[in-house]
Image (spheres, rainbow, N blue to C red):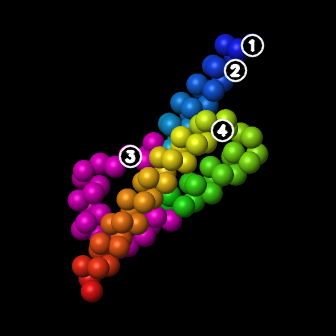
Amino acid sequence: MEISLFASAALTFVLLWFILSPVLHVDRREVLSVLGDGERTLTDQKERCIQVLRDLDLDFETQKILESDYQFMKSQISHELAGILERLDLLRKDAN
């Protein structure tokens, strides 16, 4: 039974990572593209992260994911969102 629970948790983690990794992955080419596209791209990324956080909260509330997986993914996405917000602030300060 303990092995089954561990296997389920591991599978859940792998599936969440597979589904959310495109959102969390930052490629250098993407960063350069963001710098070129500016505020619009960053705003789109911000909205996408917020939606992912909402979906993640719903999945946790409906007990579709384990608390440990929820905490890990929320931390990763929140970190990504903080970086996006920081870049938006810098971009807006440079524009003024």
Contact? badges 2 and 4 (CB < 8 Å) = no
| Residue at point 27%, 57% (across, down) | 31
Q: Which residue is mark 4?
A: 67
> Which comes before the other along the chain, label 2 or label 4?
2
Kindly tell me whether residue 41 is visible in this rendering: no
Kindly tell me whether residue 48 is visible in this rendering: yes
Q: Which residue is mark 3?
A: 25
Total count of labels:
4
List x then y, in percent, for residue 67: 66, 38
Report, in whole angstroms, how far the alpha carbon at label 2 lies from the one at label 1: 6 Å
Contact? badges 2 and 1 (CB < 8 Å) = yes
Q: Is residue 31 left or right of residue 53?
A: left
Q: Is residue 42 magenta?
A: yes
Contact? badges 2 and 3 (CB < 8 Å) = no
Q: Amino acid at mark 2?
A: Leu
Q: Amino acid at mark 3?
A: His
Marks 3, 1: nearer the viewer: 1
Q: Amino acid at mark 1?
A: Met
Q: Which mark is residue 1?
A: 1
List x then y, in percent, for residue 56: 62, 49
Marks 2, 3: nearer the viewer: 2
> Which comes before the other along the chain, label 3 or label 1?
1
Q: Is residue 95 left or right of residue 41?
A: left
Report, in whole angstroms, how far the alpha carbon at label 2 lies from the one at label 4: 13 Å
> Which comes before the other along the chain, label 4 or label 1?
1
> Which comes before the other along the chain, label 3 or label 4?
3
Which portion, as a residue range, is magenta? 21-47
User: Label 1: few (<14), some or many (≥20) within 10 Å?
Assistant: few
Name the quarter where the C terminus is drawn: bottom left
In front here: 68 or 12?
Answer: 68
| Residue at point 61%, 36% (across, down) | 68
